[in-house]
Image: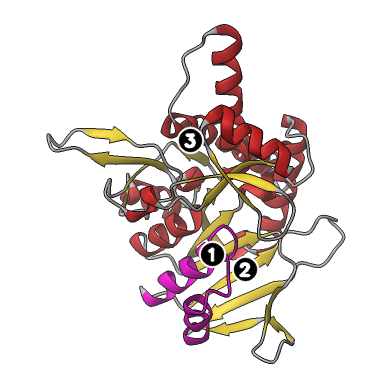
Amino acid sequence: MEEKKLAIVAFGGNAILRAGQQGTVQEQKENVYRACKTLFETIKSKSNLIIIHGNGPQVGNILLQNTAGAKMFGIPEMPLDVCGAYSQGFLGYLIEQQLRNILTTKDLETGVVNLITQVLVDKNDPAFKNPTKPIGPYYTKEEADKLAEDTNSIFEKDPDGIGWRKIVASPLPKQIGNSKVIEKIARDGHIVVAAGGGGIPVYYDDQKTLLGIDAVIDKDHTSALLASQTKADEFYIFTDLKRIIIETDDSKKKILDTIPIAEAKQYLEKGIFSAGGMAPKIKGAVSFIENGGSECTFLHFPDNPEDPIYKTKIVR
């Protein structure tokens, strides 16, 4: 029997909580079920899986609940790294549950394991002086201005013009905790959910003590690093973009279905993709290929389950 390939699959936090939704557990369960169903239809039959999810909308909401609880009831606020750990737990639970529901319909007995994962970062990463990672819900300009004043936070307009979102530091991941354990469980045929939200950001102080730090790691960078550390064969990124479209030098629109890595790097150098949007995904894909991968596939996660799933590939 031919050994299965190992695939890294990255779900965006926006695939789990769609723009315009309230953020109820039921909404997120339904979105997770659809994402997992799509996953089985397109990937699972031929590959062992490691799933990494985003947490941008969810960790922002947890921070808001933190702030409200502190103001109304005097409950101590938790730092951002702990909020990230909260989101890993509850989103991992939703993904594991819906995966098991799908496995039952297919008479499969594959194990599903959710691992809370710490990810090492550099405490001196320049990202701490230049926050770019959007988290939480979308606001109007007026709402964002008031929240910025009330919570001493930074808000920026979403590049797609949907609204304003809080932004925080997003350092690069250096080492993923338990990466060998994650790889072993996945290659044994079990589905692993790990490094959710890009992982809980941690660092070593001067006494070599492991500590959390106030940040959110971009899950696409973490996914690419984990893909390299586990020597994954395939890398898939789910996105809510139907097509990757850029504007050419002569102001015409160009649809990108297959992007050679050299071309992708040129687009990044020109700043074609936004730091809070596609840039981390493209950088993650480039990093994976430069570290031995053959290609990275972006899969469109459609609003309507009946809509086709569009694919864009970055190749050597």
User: Where residue 295 sits: x, y (%)?
Assistant: 51, 77
Q: Give the mark toward the camera: 1 or 2.
A: 1
Q: Residue furthest toward the left?
A: 207
Mark yes or no: residue 194 visible. no
- Separation of residues labelled 1 and 2 (CA atoms): 9 Å
Answer above or below: position of 69 versus 36: above
Residue at mark 3? 84
Which residue, given by chain and number where applicable, does mark 2 sit on?
298
Three-letter residue code for mark 1: Lys
Give the residues in magenta.
Answer: 262-290
Mark 3–mark 2 distance (CA, rounded to whole Å): 25 Å
- 67 relative to 283, above or below: above
Q: Nearer the viewer, residue 129 or 79?
A: 129
| Image position of 45 with respect to 71: above or below | below
Callout 2: SS: strand
Residue topped by disc 1: 281
Q: Position of residue 78 (x, y in %)?
A: 45, 23
Q: Earlier in the sequence, mark 3 or mark 1?
A: 3
Judge the density around disc 3: few (<14), some (14-19), many (≥20) Cα neighbours within 10 Å: many
